[in-house]
Image (cartoon, rainbow, N blue to C red):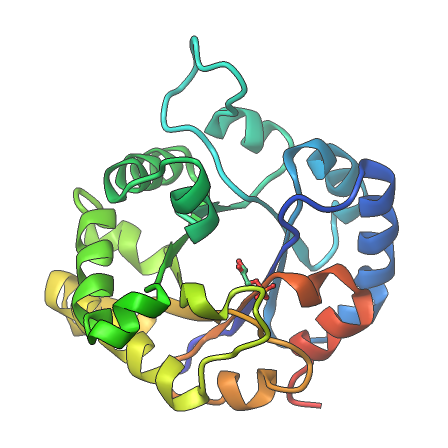
């Protein structure tokens, strides 16, 4: 079976609401007619502005994080219900920058995925190794562990709809892309562990993105790999033209 590709822009800590309105307004006509699912993950502060413009278009809205509790004394945090109320459909969970700078662990990632699924948000679950871990030869073991813990308690029915993003940390924002073979190899390992957990049918259906210095020039080669079902794009998602070229990678 063929999986529909999914290209998501992770804007990280960039763009004011006004700038976000400008970028999504540019993107809407440019990505029209593409055969991939298109998502933009803006900062929290721009979700409302972007949502109002994206309503009724082919571009879905995503957030970059959420808390696993329903509500309460969690200063500075945002809940799944708050995101849903703004029209958010996807939420990035466990990005390496959140793990590195904000103390996220495989356990908090698991809690967040369970809450997102309970509420009806689609998690984009991030995993990936550091340069040191790659050089030590533990990439496969590491991502297997990250995925197994992330999916603890997730049912097969739920797992089908989850999106996984394989993002080698050494390739993020560095201009060093994993080769298409390296990226595909790890995406295949991830699909393998999903198969062990849920069986071949779920493994065939789940979508796995690659992320890490993906750009207009390398997107086609990466996305034509058999186990790569799209991209999670940082820097190149901040310019309408570059992001569109990735969305329309088939030319
Ligand atoms: P870059 O595309 O800027 O390397 O970022 C990738 C990323 O972290 C997307 O989540």
Relative to 174, say whether 84 is above or below. above
Q: Is residue 103 left or right of residue 50?
A: left
Identify whether 113 is placed above or below 48.
below
Q: Residue at x 11, y 67 (%)?
A: 196
Image coordinates for residue 221, horizontal then vertical, percent? 54, 91
Give the position of the C terminus as an image quadrant: bottom right
Residue 222 or 128: which is nearer the viewer?
128
Q: Is residue 36 above or below residue 227?
A: above
Q: Quadrant of ligand 1?
A: bottom right
Residue, x 66% and y 77% (percent of image)?
246
Q: Position of residue 33 (x, y in %)?
A: 74, 75
**Image quarter for residue 64?**
top right
Question: Which of these two is toward me, 247 or 235?
Answer: 235
Task: Identify the residue shown where x is 16% and y is 67%.
Answer: 141
Q: Position of residue 202 (x, y in %)?
A: 24, 66
Q: Is 50 left or right of 159, judged from the image as shown?
A: right
Residue displayed at 62% across by 48% down: 12
């Amino acid at each position: 079976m063929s999986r529909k590709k999914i290209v998501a822009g992770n804007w990280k800590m960039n763009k004011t609401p006004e700038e976000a309105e400008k970028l999504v307004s540019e993107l809407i006509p440019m990505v029209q007619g593409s055969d991939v699912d298109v998502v933009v993950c803006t900062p929290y502060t721009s979700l409302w502005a972007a949502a109002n413009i994206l309503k009724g278009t082919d571009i879905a809205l995503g957030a970059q994080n959420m808390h696993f509790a329903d509500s309460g004394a969690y200063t500075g945090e945002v809940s799944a219900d708050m995101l849903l109320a703004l029209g958010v459909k996807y939420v990035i969970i466990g990005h390496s920058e959140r793990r590195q700078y904000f103390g996220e662990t495989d356990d908090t990632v698991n809690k967040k995925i369970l809450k997102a699924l309970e509420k009806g948000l689609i998690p984009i679950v991030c995993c990936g190794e550091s340069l040191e871990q790659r050089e030590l030869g533990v990439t496969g073991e590491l991502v297997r562990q990250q995925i197994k813990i992330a999916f603890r308690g997730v049912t097969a029915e739920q797992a089908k709809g989850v999106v996984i993003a394989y993002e080698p940390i050494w390739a993020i924002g560095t201009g060093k892309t994993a080769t298409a073979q390296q990226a595909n190899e790890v995406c295949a390992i991830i699909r393998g562990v999903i198969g062990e957990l849920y069986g071949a049918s779920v493994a065939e259906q789940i979508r796995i993105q690659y992320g890490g210095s993906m750009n207009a020039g390398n997107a086609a080669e990466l996305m034509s790999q058999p186990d790569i079902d799209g991209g999670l794009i940082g820097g190149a998602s901040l310019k309408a033209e570059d992001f569109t070229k990735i969305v329309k990678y088939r030319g």
